[in-house]
Image (cartoon, grey):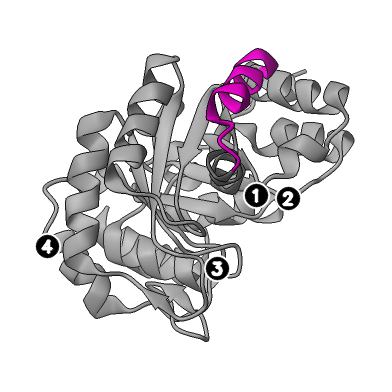
């Protein structure tokens, strides 16, 4: 009798787009935001969806609120599933304001985090400090992900400043530059107050950078994920994905949902 383990979907069914790649991927990355789910739920998330998650961010400053054994267990699970894990960028901003960057980085290293988000979404950070933080974190062996944009309601992207920031961050060691979208996906960055994408702004940004793979777009809402995939393709990097939406996002990338089926099949 044939074992269930030996069964396999035909690739034309499992990936109608014909464009998805297994881990480790260089593009089409998914960054999931964990706002505090329990260890059992976290383990089940990785059991079911770990193959489709590339980065997990423990949102905001929540890392400091976990019991130490739970935090260590989450980090260990991420390592086992080949997922980069990092604290939220706001936590580093706190360390900057308290003049505690080195003690912060020391504990982050000792816990076993392998990623760092460098952001200034809430505080003011001059370019020299931002660059030095990126270089310092890179020298410690972290994968560094920077973020552009403010978290305040109504804040918009300044295209010229964004392009300059992208080039500068990459030169100092950032792997990806994240376009701020918050966990709400509304009233910030490329999104209006209803969460709709500013198509003209996206086109303007893409026209000015040589490689769109250096960007990660925060896109917590399904409508945003579908629009970005339809516009940029299944290999676009997307972030602030809810744990509940990982399989849903992967289905969008592959053309396994109606929102992207027609567009991706036409291109495959």
Q: Residue beneath label 1, please?
A: 60
Cα gap from disc 3 to disc 1, whole angstroms = 22 Å
Disc number lying in front (3 or 4)? 4
Looking at the rendered structure, which numbered label has been put on residue 207?
Answer: 4
Quarter that holds the N terminus: top right
Q: Is residue 79 left or right of residue 178?
A: right
Looking at the rendered structure, which numbered label has been put on residue 222?
Answer: 3
Could you tell me residue 35's position as x and y percent?
Answer: 73, 50
Instruction: Please report whichever mark, 2 or 1, sits nearer to the chain's N-terminal start.
Output: 2
**Is 151 included in the stretch rendered in magenta?**
no
Main structural element of the magenta stretch: helix, strand or loop? helix
Cα gap from disc 3 to disc 2, whole angstroms = 18 Å
Q: Residue beneath label 2, please?
A: 35
**Pointer 2 with pointer 1, Cβ within 8 A:** yes
Q: Which residues are magenta?
A: 98-111
Label 3 environment density (alpha carbons within 10 Å; few <14, some 14–19, many ≥20)? some
Disc number lying in front (2 or 4)? 2
Instruction: Please report whichever mark, 3 or 2, sits nearer to the chain's N-terminal start.
Output: 2
Q: Is residue 158 left or right of residue 120?
A: left
205 or 51: nearer the eye? 205
């Amino acid at each position: 009798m044939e074992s269930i383990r030996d069964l396999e979907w035909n690739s034309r069914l499992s990936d109608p787009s014909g464009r998805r790649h297994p881990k480790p991927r260089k593009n089409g990355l998914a960054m999931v935001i964990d706002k505090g789910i329990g260890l059992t739920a976290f383990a089940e998330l990785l059991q079911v969806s770990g193959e489709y998650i590339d980065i997990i961010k423990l949102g905001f400053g929540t890392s400091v609120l976990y019991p130490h054994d739970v935090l260590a267990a989450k980090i260990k699970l991420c390592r086992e599933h080949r997922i980069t894990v990092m604290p939220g960028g706001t936590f580093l901003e706190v360390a900057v304001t308290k003049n505690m960057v080195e003690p912060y980085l020391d504990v982050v290293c000792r816990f076993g985090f392998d990623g760092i988000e460098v952001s200034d979404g809430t505080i003011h950070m001059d370019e020299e400090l931002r660059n030095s933080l990126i270089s310092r974190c890179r020298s410690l062996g972290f994968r560094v992900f920077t973020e552009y944009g403010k978290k305040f309601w109504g804040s918009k992207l300044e295209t010229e400043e964004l392009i300059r920031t992208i080039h500068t961050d990459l030169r100092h060691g950032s792997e990806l530059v994240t376009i701020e979208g918050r966990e709400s996906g509304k009233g910030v960055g490329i999104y209006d107050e209803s969460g709709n994408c500013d198509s003209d702004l996206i086109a303007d940004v893409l026209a000015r950078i040589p490689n769109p793979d250096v960007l990660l777009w925060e896109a917590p809402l399904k409508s945003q994920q579908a629009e970005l995939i339809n516009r940029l393709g299944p290999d676009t990097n997307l972030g602030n994905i809810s744990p509940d939406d990982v399989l849903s996002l992967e289905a969008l990338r592959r053309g396994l949902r109606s929102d992207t089926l027609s567009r991706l099949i036409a291109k495959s």
